[in-house]
Image (cartoon, helix red, strand yellow):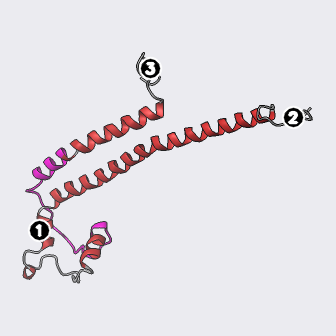
């Protein structure tokens, strides 16, 4: 409906409509997207992972986050299959690995959509500023032409 007009209203331009329709669509997605991820996490509760080797010192975003929260892991690589360690947080995370994966995927997708939301929300502001700059430029050119034509009250008798 870009360019559609009635007696009482006129639709905005393409970028304005695109920006607002995309931000509205992303708002709707953000409100409803958690449902399939939570359902997947619940369905995956019985499934865990068996750790084949120590992953405490493998570079990953998760290990980087844990390092910044609690410091360096005391593990020296002998944590896998050691019954003397008992039921640790690592074993708990292994028991619910696929559910945690579903929740972590949801967080990353939410971050993506929030960034897109911000991009399109700012896009119409940028478009408004660009249109304002063009309008000011046109006004300056018209004013300059008016001054050269003698409309500014200047004595232009020697202009030619």
In the picture of the structure, the residue carrying the numbered disc 1 is 92
Tell which circle, 1 or 3, labels the residue nearer the N-terminal end.
3
Instruction: Measure the alpha-carbon separation of dots 1 and 3.
Output: 59 Å
Task: Magenta stretch: give its range.
Answer: 35-62
Give the residue drawn at x 20%, y 47%: 34
Which quadrant of the rendered structure holds the N terminus? top left
Give the residue drawn at x 36%, y 46%: 117
**Between tags 2 and 1, which lies in front?**
2
Snapshot quadrant of residue 158: top right
Nearer to me, 143 or 156: 156
Query: Could you say where residue 80 lies in the image, as x and y percent from the top left?
Result: 16, 76
- Residue 156, disc: 2
Snapshot quadrant of residue 83: bottom left
Give the residue drawn at x 45%, y 25%: 2
**Between tags 3 and 2, which lies in front?**
2
In the picture of the structure, the residue carrying the numbered disc 3 is 4
Task: From the image, give the main secondary structure of the stretch colored magenta.
Answer: loop
């Amino acid at each position: 409906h870009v360019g559609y007009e009635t007696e009482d209203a006129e639709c905005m331009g393409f970028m304005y409509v695109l920006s607002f329709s995309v931000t509205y669509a992303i708002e709707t997605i953000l409100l409803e997207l958690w449902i399939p991820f939570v359902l997947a996490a619940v369905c995956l509760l019985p499934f865990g992972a068996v750790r084949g080797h120590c992953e405490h010192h493998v570079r990953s975003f998760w290990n980087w986050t844990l390092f910044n929260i609690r410091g360096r892991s005391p593990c020296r690589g002998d944590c896998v299959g050691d019954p003397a360690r008992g039921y640790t947080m690592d074993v708990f995370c292994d028991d619910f690995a696929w559910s945690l994966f579903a929740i972590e995927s949801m967080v990353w997708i939410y971050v993506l959509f929030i960034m897109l939301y911000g991009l399109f929300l700012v896009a119409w502001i940028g478009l408004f500023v660009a249109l304002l700059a063009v309008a000011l430029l046109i006004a300056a050119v018209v004013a300059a032409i008016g001054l050269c034509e003698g409309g500014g009250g200047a004595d232009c008798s020697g202009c030619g």
